[in-house]
Image (cartoon, coloured by chain):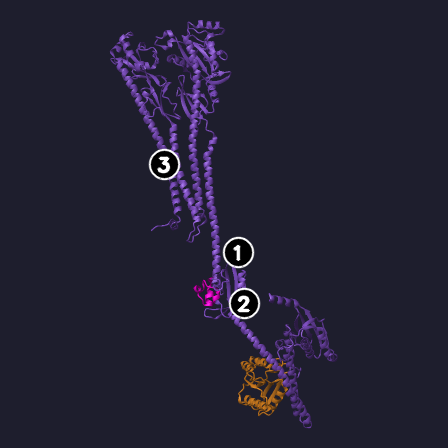
Chain colours: A orange, B purple
Amino acid sequence: MKPNARLAEILLVEDNEGDIELTREAFDEAKFRNNLHITEDGDQALDYLYKRNGYENAVTPDIVLLDLNLPGTDGREVLETIKSDPMLKRIPVIVMTSSKAEKDIIESYDLHANCYIVKPVNAAKFIQVVQNVENFWVDIVCLPVNT
Amino acid sequence: MTIKPAELANKNPYLLRNLALYGTCFFFITVLLTAFVIAPKINSVFESQRSSDIQIELALEAQLFTRFVESQHSILRDLAGYPSIVNSVMLSNTNEPMLIDLFENVAIGGKSGRVILQDIAGNVLIQSATDLQGSYGIKQLWFERILNADIPYYFRLLKQTGKQFTFQISTPVTYNNFVEGVLSAEFSMPLDQVFIALSFGKHIAFKLSQDHISINTDSSHIDIAREDSLTLTSPAVTFTYISDDALVRNKKRALRNTILLVLLVGLGISFLLFSLYGYRNLIVKHTKIRVRPSLNRVYLTPFIVAVVGVAASTTAFLIINNLHQVSVEEQQIASSRAAITSIRERISGNLEILESTKAFFDASDTVERAAFKTFVTPLLANHSNIKAVAWLPKVTLDQRREYINSAQLDGLKNYNFRELSPTREIVVAGIRSAYYPVFFAEPLLGNETAFGFDLASNSRRFSALIEAGNSGDKVATAPINLVDDKITGSGILVFYPVYNSLAQSSNDSLASVKGYVQLVLRTSSLVAQTLENTNDVQSLYIRDITDEDKPETIYGTAISAEHTVFSESIDVAGRTWRMDVVGMRAEESLNWVPWLVLVSGLTFVAFTTAGLIQLIRRREVVERLVTERTAELRMLSSIVANSNDIFIVTEADDIDAENNGPRIIYVNEAFTRLTGYSYDEVIGRSPRILQGAKTDRQELNRIRLALEQGKPFVGELLNYTKSGKELWIDINIAPIIDIHGRIIQFVAVQRDITERRQAQVDREKLINELTGSNEELERFAFVCSHDLQEPLRMIRSFSEKLQLHIASDLERDEKGKRYFKFITDGATRAQDLIADILTYSSINNDVDKLQAINTQDLVDNVKRTLQEEFLAGGMRISSDILPTSHGNQTQLYQLFQNLINNAVKYRRADVTLKVHIGVIDADNYWQFSVKDNGIGMEQRHLGKIFDVFQRLHGKSQYAGTGVGLSICKKVVTRHGGTLWVESDVGVGSTFHFTLPKPIPIEIEDETQRKAS
């Protein structure tokens, strides 16, 4: 079903450079070939998704990895925007954040987040979680075909 | 079962009114009936009864009179049937001794009966007496009629002497049914034998008239004469019934007065009943709710009272006026009678001269002119109304010359017998058998023209002369005009015959007349003089009614019918004068009595009515007030009853009594609902039953103190419900003061504030808890921060040390270098965060250290720290003249520093940075602004920039922890101000914040308020 020839397009929204580094390493070691796009804040992420302000040639991602605490427009707003836009709402959004707060978890799911993951403190575990995410969302899950 | 009067009144409060109403209606109906139906009917019945009574009586009297006459006639007729009389007539025997004897002894007309027998030629055959009153001449009409058998007998009135009257009856003497002679008799009878009416002599008089002779009974006692006549054919007389109209008037008046009196009593009773009803109705309280009648009905009673009262007063006025009128009328009648009497006396006084002059002539055989003068002159001196006294001798034609000569000898040069020609000129008298010239006359003056005037020449005077001669009494002429010094006045001539004493035997008295004494009386001046001497008469009208068909006016003019006319007929020398007199009315001053009654009655009515109206008005006002107040009270009581607040009303007594306390006299429903006590349980008890163990005694003392001073009390108090539950109330006690200023009750309004109280307690507890946890948190944050510095320093310093340690290995390992950078950066950021958190949390601590701060100095200090960067980037920072404010020095410094640093940090690279610190003096605070021309912010982010850790930019763009603005916000808030921002992307941002000015006055006020 899934065309292997096609690279998995992954958008990472994350302002912490360390986390970006770790995520990137995790995806580099992944089973599947992928294309990781990084935006460092909410506005940039939305620009990317709407293909504007320098992202006119961006590729619509297959999944979005979204941090909640972002400078300016934060992850919640980005999530809300994606899930309330008919063009974007089918894109699975995986919330990855360092917050364990119940409030954040409930709020994210209320905003139709597809899943919520707390960033592990341990670097090895962090890489494993990212790889699991990729396995699940890229390999196991059947995603809608982008039009 | 007995009913008390009050109960009765309550049972039927309209009893009096109904009585009065029905009574009045009944009386009004009665009165109307009386006035318009019964009274006129009674009047007319009265009148017709009287008329018919009079007619009947008149007819009866006339019949009786006729019978009387016929009975007298029958006696005469029987006498005429005597053969000797018939013989005598047949033979014209004048000397039948037996007849003379018979005649003299016949009992006709009493002892003075006179009988005359005439033959058919009229010659007197036999007569029983010489002094015959009637005339028995040949050419008499009646004589002819008897001879012709036209009438069965002839009746003739002759004369009246006092209460005696004389009449003549003549009857034919027949033989073989042929009239052969006439037998006449003269009767003298007392009047009261003829007229037998029951009331005769009291208020009734009679009059018989035949031709110009009339006889009448005394009518002087009749006040207002009313005459009803009946003309009889046989005997041919007019029979007149004179009744006293004053009687009828009085009866009518009495009837009217009776009706009025009934009316007065009725109206008076109605008036009293209505007044009583009106007043009683207003004074007695009605227990049941009165339906308010319309305005018309409210004033119906006084209206009726007024109407009835006015009617009653008017009636009383009319009655008294009537009574008064009677007395006035009586007085008028008395005056009238007095006037008539005085006129009559005066006339008779004047006529006395005739008597004495006649006596003078009777006594002397011959009277000389001088002797006459001597005798008469002194008599005249006292009688100014006598124009003349004259002597008219009977002069035959033979003696004429002799008399004329005698007179001329006496000095009357031109004396001759004269008469009035048909052309009314005085000429010498013609030839006739006998003359009655004016021979002597006194006074001479004014009577010159009368000398020689032959009275026989004037038929009117002559007939009077003849009559006088026949009757032998004074006879007056009808009124004539007397010319007297060119003043024309009415007068009469009175003749008194003087007979030849030697010729007594003659059967014709006329024949024996020697002459007449004549009196010329000025009647009009006599009457006028009489009236001058009296005040009795208002107006007077005298007529000579001897000839009833042709009455002649003697004095005055006819009197209109509206006056009360008193009439009397008097006899003046054989003539009848009718005198109509309107007597002088009584003094007008007497008239005030009825008016006084009317005025006082009306005044009384006015006062009664006004009193009623006044009471009604007052009641209206009171009722309106009561209605309003009732509505008000109902409203208030419904407010009180339905209020959610407790209302308690207590008596004002016993507030400091040890055990009892003030007694409760009212509680509303909210009370029973909130306290659980029922209404009956608490009435009469004290509010103290609500107080319990935890009730604040000091507060209770304050209440007692306030109540004792009559002051209101406001406060909060802990009460207990019946079941012992605590009930916090907000209590407001106010005294109720009566109109005298005394405190009679207290009203307490209590509001259940248990919940509010509980909430307050809860809030205080929460605040305490929060304050505690906050402090703990701050302490914790502080400790944390310090303690966290330690491991971070370890991480940082040892990772740096490790970096140096494996520096050679890292030469080739780019990834390793990056990892080390992540470690160092992370640790540095954590240290920055901790420092900021420390700053943020420490803002609470110094909040009380307030002092005057020169903000200009603060800004200058901040600028100084930035000096180098200014020079480098060519930035410009300007400011207004900044004021001295109030606050914490360190914090305000931090505030300005953070804001200015932010402006510097987020400047636009391509534009020279301009920062301006401004200030506006608002009334109670300073409003500062920090304005830059930096990158600005999007509108949607402005809401969250003051949140802790909130950042708008990635760390790679602008470094920072996201705490700076949070610190600013906290500083401003802690100083009682507000902080906000205006910003446009690409234009710049302006941060505004306010700092309150220190207001010492307000603080002082606050303390004062708390103290009071």
Q: Position of residue B473 (x, y in %)?
A: 39, 14
Q: Position of residue B798 (x, y in %)?
A: 66, 91
Q: Which residue is the extreme one toward the right?
A: B871
Q: Nearer the viewer, residue B943 or B686?
A: B686
Q: Check the image and report above or below for B712 versus A25.
A: above
Count numbered badges in the picture. 3
At x 47%, y 46%, the residue is B613
Same chain for the residues at labels 3 and 2, yes or no? yes
Amino acid type shown at disc 3: Ile
Residue B450 visible to an observer of this rendering = no
**Secondary structure of residue under mark 3:** helix
**Front position among marks 1 and 3:** 1
Q: Check the image and report above or below for B52 versus B189.
A: below
Q: Quadrant of the C terminus of chain B?
A: bottom right
Q: Name the residue that disc number 1 marks.
A: B741
Q: Which residues are magenta?
A: B664-689
Q: CA distance from mark 2 to mark 1?
A: 29 Å
Would residue A119 be found to the left or right of residue B265 on screen? Answer: right
**Front position among marks 3 and 2:** 2
Amino acid type shown at disc 1: Gly
Mark closer to the chain start, 3 or 2: 3
At x 44%, y 44%, the residue is B303
Q: Check the image and report above or below for B412 versus B679.
A: above
The label number, if any, that marks residue B38 in the structure image: 3
Dot 2 crowding, Cα within 10 Å, few <14, some 14–19, many 20+: few
Query: Which quadrant of the figure has residue A131?
Result: bottom right
Query: Which quadrant of the figure has residue B349?
Result: top left
